[in-house]
Amino acid sequence: MRGPLGRSQPFAEPFSEPGRDAMKAYLMTTGSLFGLLTVVHVWRVIAEGPHLATDPWYILITLAAAALCLWAWRLLRRAARP
């Protein structure tokens, strides 16, 4: 396969989209971070007791992090399909 300057590109994928790998890396990173935040929040409720579960902001942040984690992994799975 020839590149834009006529040079041979032996390892280039013929149908790769520019930025697709960067987007996958971004989705994996954000999905992992939001998942980690969710796990740490749930762990903290277990460790410190149920009084944190009565704080509306704490619950909102935990649910938002969980939703963003699931959304990122769903988009990543969709991006992995050919």
Image: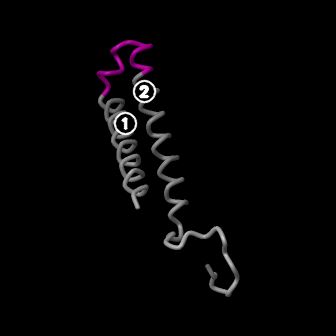
Circle 2: element type: helix
Mark 1: amino acid:
Ile
Which stretch is magenta? 43-55
Say if the magenta span includes residue 11.
Answer: no
- Residue 67, percent across and down? 33, 41
Q: Residues within 10 Å of mark 1 (few under 14, many from 20)?
A: some
Query: In this rendering, would 3 be left or right of 38?
Result: right
Q: Which mark is residue 11?
A: none
Say if the magenta span includes residue 46.
Answer: yes
Marks 2 and 1 in Cβ contact (< 8 Å): yes
Mark 2: amino acid:
His
Q: Which mark is residue 61?
A: 1
Query: In this rendering, would 23 be left or right of 9?
Result: left
Residue at 43% in and 55% down: 80
Residue at 54% in and 53% down: 25
Instruction: State the residue position of label 2.
Output: 41
Give the mark, 2 or 1, whose residue is nearer the N terminus: 2
Task: Report the predominant secondary structure element of the magenta stretch.
Answer: helix
